Amino acid sequence: MKLKKNDSFKCYLISSPSLALIALIVVFPIIYTFYISLTNMNTYHWFNPEIIGFKNYKQALFVMDSGFLKAIFITIVWTVVNMVFQMVIAFSIASLLNSPLLKYRRLYKTILMFPWAMPGYVSILLWKTGMFNSQFGLLNQWLTKLGFSSIRWLASDLSAFICCTVVNLWLALPFMIMIIDGGLQSIDRSFYESATMDGASTFCKAVKITIPCLKPIIGPAVIITLFTTFKQFDIIYLMTRQPGSQTGSTIQTIITYAYENAFISNNYGYSSSISIIIFIMLIVFARFSLFTNKKEEAL
Amino acid sequence: MKKKNPLKIFTINIFFIIACFFALLPILYAFSLSLNANSSILSSDFSFIPKVLSLKNYKAVFVEKPVIMWFLNTFSLAFFTVILSLSVSIPAAYMFSEFSFKGKKPIIRILILLYSFPSILSMFAIYKLLSNLNLINTRIGLVIVYTGTMAIFGLINMKGYFDTIPNEIEDAARLDGASDFMVVRKIIIPLARPSIIVTGIQVLIYVWNEYIFAINFMTGSDKFTLASGLYTMQATEKSGSWAVFSAASIVISIPILTIFFLSQKYMISGLTSGGVKG
Amino acid sequence: MKRKHLTIVLFLVLATILSLSCSKQKDENSPITITIWHDKEDVVVDVIKQALEPLSPDIVVNFERKASLAETLKLVGNNPQTAPDMYLYAHDKIGVYVEMGILEPITNLVNSESIETLVPMTKTAATYKGKIYQLPIYFETLLFLYNKKYMKPEEVPSTTDELLTYVQNKTKYGHFGYIEQHSTPYYFGPWINGFGGKVIDEEGNPCLDSKETLQALAYHLKFVKYMPDETEYATVNTLFSEGKAHTTIGGPWLIPTIKKAGIDVGIANMPIINQTGKPLTPYLGVQGFQVLKTGVQNPEKKEAIIKILQILSSEEVEIKLALASGCAPAREGCYSYDSIKNDEIVMAMRNTAENAVPMPNIPEMDVMWTVTGNLLTAVNMSGKDIETSAKQAQEKALSLIENMK
């Protein structure tokens, strides 16, 4: 019997610094944003907003036109596609990294972590201007050298989506690889030994031993990555929507859509209400997709 | 006796070389740009090895901008944030992992949901908060903001790993009379080393590369961090050059890579090196 | 024992008296610090620092470079402890800050002569709802630039139709007759203004679907077809610097980079649009000093700011600043100086300023940049129908402006 039930006070006490910080930096802003969403804080009432009730929310619901629905759809597709690719690729790479055949493991691992080390927006800029630019981006230069015609990578919705996915994977894989790699190392080798003695194939071992053992370890990381992917703003915005360097594609996620339709109007009350609405949508999404009994065990 | 299949070894190495090339592609581009003597323009005639090599962009990075000062600023911010973050999250993660107490499950659920709120949206609120506490423009204020932003991540990430540590080890320790603190120190931390290091590095990278909060909350260019300094060096229409910017980006990323490389050997968990056979 | 206590007490009393009197003295002699925010290069700031030297040690000016000045100012604007006293920035944000209630009319702080001797267009740019909020220092407009290797000065097209013919003939084998940042609203300015259209009018009504705007979009599209896809600065800069583009419309900031790349660049007057008889008329961007209300609350600070502004209104200072920044001074008198008269770029901008349209400084303009950018992208890059796109953009603009209130 491990878990003691009478130590609630001690648990809260020791967790209190962490919880206090979270309350301060995460909870308070949300509450404050909610408060602002009930006021009329905009350019004309910047420093002295007054409470106007739910008017902002009424206004916000009018924003939910077809553009918003398309944005929801794209956000979901974006999240699903990215998560699937991330998990599969990260798992494969991490497994191969732990293969006994590999000598320069440490070197490869470090190099694979490079994308993680560079500031995100720098990487995005480099991809956008250095790789995908239709005039002198690397990719098109190589294509023309090989005799093909250059492609307008970011101009159409589909190819822009693919390019953004590539960049997202590039940025996010190192973290996932690290986590899975750490998890793989914690699996007791004796499991594999006894499985081999029973004649199991590599694939069978992977499915029946590795994955179940990994689940609890990487569970939290998966959830965190899920949310990070969902609320990803930088990649899509900087690659395709930034004023002064737009590319012709019209893909939007909920967040970029909210930004272009609410945040630039300097109406903080209104933008705050959109933020709260998005937040509520996220909660609903999480409730349905995450908190089935099975997944909660993993937590 | 396992036969070392040379074909397999070859294939696996090729696979990784290709993967690494892909991982490094934009960085090699930036690197080559930074070594280019022809510094002011990108080129539609690009080759990985520039026609005229020069280190002058790197020199420019160190000479034109107070990079050393930025580095010290960032380093101190990152150091304190990581220390504070780990010392606050490890006990909390342990509590949430080991013990069951009233309200634990709902709190975890809430924490995960809270993590979905984008932190940029909170900036205004946090600014108001800090200015009321007179913590704008102070290192402490920024450290608190960074720690708070990563607190949920730290707690959940490490808790997950702590969950996998078999209870028998802890039971054995307690039977020997260890207090909670000793259990954490002597058993949990060594066994959970990979997770702690991953969390610590993630926090480090976050602070190292964070510029939005840094730019808005710290006035005065002597308080700039590397990331905010880099942001001001962007090659916009009015100023800056791509080559110097690339050089600066590379310079800024090197410390993190060094730390990562050095921490590799600690990433192996104590679990695989003995312990308790269940 | 008693003596020890006595000495300690005496010492404490003495120390307190000394420190009190010291701090009193400090107050009388301590300099007044004025904080100025900016987003300019060191070159420019150094000139200002030098000019303000005579004011020290009584008045100390503290310059802080802020990369996202506009946003940060919104956060701190009315907080006397963290807000600056003045800031040096473009004029187009004046409307937003006035509505927020943080700007002080500049007419309260400078004499009328400083205002009267300004280039008229800059005065217009600095005015919002009838009051002047900025002391203009220098301004910039876009210029018509050409590569002398491919085009001789006599060959520069004087009308846009001539330019179109040139483009049609010369755009091949990787060369471009004419490029620009085609889908960036700021660079669409010359076209829309030249047709008499507007993005938004003075009352804050967007005009994206007006007849003139549609004409401008259609005519402009003809040129866009011969340009590269990207509309960003990096593309234009690189192509022109490598000699792959023969002409462009760009800002004065482009010139040093091009010259460094070895291009022999020429500046010409903007071509005249055949349909309207007006030249391509770019936007005017005026940089100047704005003063915050928090800066003038303290009477001593107000005095200091008045003195600072007086120095900065002098012709010599403005000339130095203009030359350091590569822009044109905002004061009429400066143009009789040789250093200015001989500067080809500055004089070209002064000419353009006669007709140039200042960027709208009303708060509603903030949302127009994104909407207009999207409209241009839809028409130029996605090939959508002009009329429908413009109507949609107009509706979007109206709803965004509604949302602002």
Image (cartoon, rainbow, N blue to C red):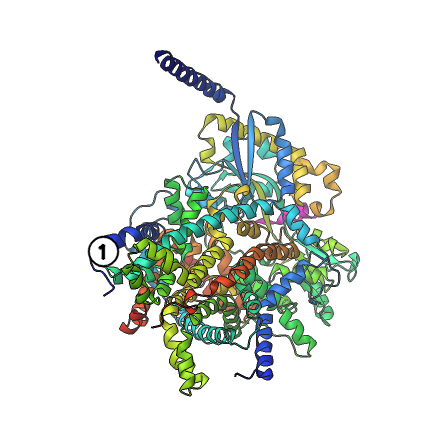
- Quadrant containing the N terminus of chain A is bottom left
Q: Is residue C283 left or right of residue B145?
A: right
Considering every residue shown, the one lying at the far front of the view is: B176
Considering every residue shown, the one lying at the far left of the view is: A6
Considering every residue shown, the one lying at the far top of the view is: C3
- Quadrant containing the C terminus of chain A is bottom left
The magenta segment is C348-359
Q: Is residue A16 left or right of residue C37?
A: left
- Residue C253 position, x and y percent, is 66, 51
Q: Which amino acid type corresponds to the residue marked 1 in the rendered image?
A: Asp
Q: Which is more toward the observer, B80 or A172?
A: B80
- Residue A207 position, x and y percent, is 40, 81
Dot 1: chain letter:
A
Q: Which residue is depicted at the point 70% across and 53% down? A: B56
Can I make out residue C329 in this image?
no
Height in image: C15 above or below C171? above
Q: Which residue is mark 1?
A: A7
- Residue C185 position, x and y percent, is 55, 58
Height in image: B250 above or below C303? below
Q: Is residue A187 magenta?
A: no
- What element does badge 1 sit on? loop
- Residue C381 position, x and y percent, is 56, 69
Q: Residues within 10 Å of mark 1 (few under 14, many from 20)?
A: some
Q: Which residue is depicted at the point 64% across and 72% down? A: A140
Height in image: C325 above or below C29? below
Q: Which is more toward the observer, C79 or C213?
A: C79
